[in-house]
Image (spheres, grey):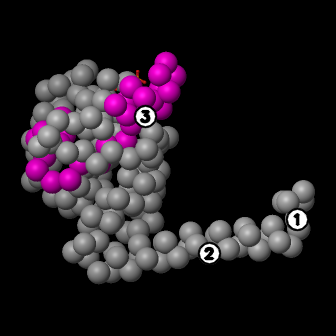
Amino acid sequence: MPQVGIVMGSDSDMPVMSKAADILEQLGVSFDMRIISAHREPDEFFEYARTAEEKGYKVIIAGAGMAAHLPGMCAAIFPMPVIGIPMHTTSLGGRDSLYSIVQMPSGIPVATVAINGGINAGLLAAKILATSDPELLTRLKDYSASLKDAVIDKDKKLQEVGYKNY
Ligand code: RP5
């Protein structure tokens, strides 16, 4: 059973949503991925959200752009955590998506990551699951250590070659 449901409003969201999928795959977290538009196919959306719990999801990652109702409507129906990813948009730079997703009314939370924040959405979903999975927690700690090592390596190179040759 997939532990995480990844859903996006359009295939134009895929470059961002695939980053969430990649990090979950790297961490050994099972997921499934769907393209479902809350606005363009409301009946299919409601079917998806109503059956999400029985499909085994513990977290949903929902990404959408513009008047982005998909994450909020998932949170209205699915009883476990929903993480929202606001998509960058050409007209308003993603502020439209961000405000639509982050400004939820009291009682229906959506954990909103940055505009185009696919990697952090995947990591946040994994961290939620890691609260009851010690092996996943260890893999997350290893991932954090690898980030630290990458910065140390970059600084080491800077000290060796100088900023003009970096
Ligand atoms: C939203 O509208 C989608 O999430 C997407 O970000 C945006 C534009 O969709 P397309 O016109 O590219 O299909 O529903």
The residue located at (43%, 44%) in the rendering is 114
Q: Which residue is mark 3?
A: 87
Q: CA distance from mark 3 to mark 2?
A: 30 Å
Residue 91 on the magenta span: yes
Quadrant where the image shows the C terminus: bottom right
Check disc 1 and give the amino acid type.
Gly
Ligand 1: image quarter: top left
Name the amino acid, label 2: Asp
Q: Secondary structure at mark 2?
A: helix
Question: Which residue: 65% across, 68% down?
Answer: 151
Left or right placement of residue 159 versus residue 104 in this view: right
Q: Earlier in the sequence, mark 3 or mark 1?
A: 3
Near-viewer residue (151 or 3): 151
Answer whether labels 3 and 2 touch (C-beta < 8 Å).
no
> Residue at position x 71%, y 73% from top?
153
Please say whether residue 18 is visible from this viewpoint.
Answer: no
Secondary structure at badge 3 equals: loop
Region rendered in magenta? 72-99
According to the image, label 1 marks what residue? 162
Residue 157 visible somewhere in the drawing: yes
Tag count in the figure? Answer: 3
State the separation of the CA atoms marked 2 and 1: 19 Å
Q: Is residue 141 above or below residue 7?
A: below
The mark nearer the N terminus, 2 or 1, is: 2
Give whichever of 17, 109 is nearer the camera: 109
Instruction: Write down the residue under mark 2.
Output: 149
Q: Is 134 located above or below residue 37 in the figure? A: below
